[in-house]
Image (cartoon, rainbow, N blue to C red):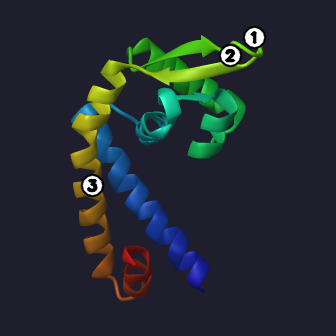
Amino acid sequence: MTWDRFALLYARVEADLAKALQRGHGLGLSEYRALVQLAGASGGELRMQELAEAVGLNQSSVTRLVARLEEAGMTRRDLCPADRRGVYSVITDEGRARLAEATPTYERSLAAALEQADDDPALSRLVLAVRG
């Protein structure tokens, strides 16, 4: 079934990306993706709920994720001026620097993982589709 092959491809690629980011930069894959989303957002900030949706996490998971990023100095929290209950996560200069350092590793690892998966006849058509 195509969906099962897609799930296998996704799992293999995600595992390779996670290992490379952790080994090379001490970043988890969700942390990296959160930094990507924050760096691309207007003003470098997103409401916690927006960040959760952007990285595919629930509210409690994104709260723990942001706490780890804050502890490492890569983000900070800010209150929404219009709604004091709204909390933003804001990327810091340290976060931007770590993202810049990790992005080449992410891109190389992604390319290598797709290349390896392309050697598997059961996955090669999916790899072609992913590469577009």
Q: Position of residue 92 (x, y in %)?
A: 39, 19
Q: Are marks 1 and 2 in contact (CB under 8 Å)?
A: yes
Compared with 56, 32 (above or below) is: above
- Residue at the location (51% across, 78% down)? 5
Q: Circle 2 — which element? A: loop
In the picture, measured across the screen, residue 117 lies left or right of residue 42, that is left
Ranked by sequence position, the earlier of labels 3 and 1 is: 1
Q: Quadrant of residue 9?
A: bottom left
Q: Circle 3 — which element? A: helix
- Residue at the location (26% across, 72% down)? 116
- Structural distance between the alpha carbons of marks 2 and 3: 34 Å
Other-residue count near label 1 (Cα within 10 Å), few / some / many at <14 / 14–19 / ≥20? few
Q: Quadrant of residue 99?
A: top left
Residue under circle 3? Answer: 107
Residue under circle 1? Answer: 84
- Residue at the location (75% across, 16% down)? 82
Which of discs 3 and 1 lies nearer the camera? The answer is 1
Q: Position of residue 95 (x, y in %)?
A: 36, 25
| Count of numbered labels shown in the rendering | 3
- Structural distance between the alpha carbons of marks 3 and 1: 38 Å
Q: Quadrant of residue 16?
A: bottom left
Quadrant holding the C terminus: bottom left
Of 39 and 108, which appears nearest the observer?
Answer: 39
Residue under circle 2? Answer: 80
Q: Position of residue 54 (x, y in %)?
A: 59, 44
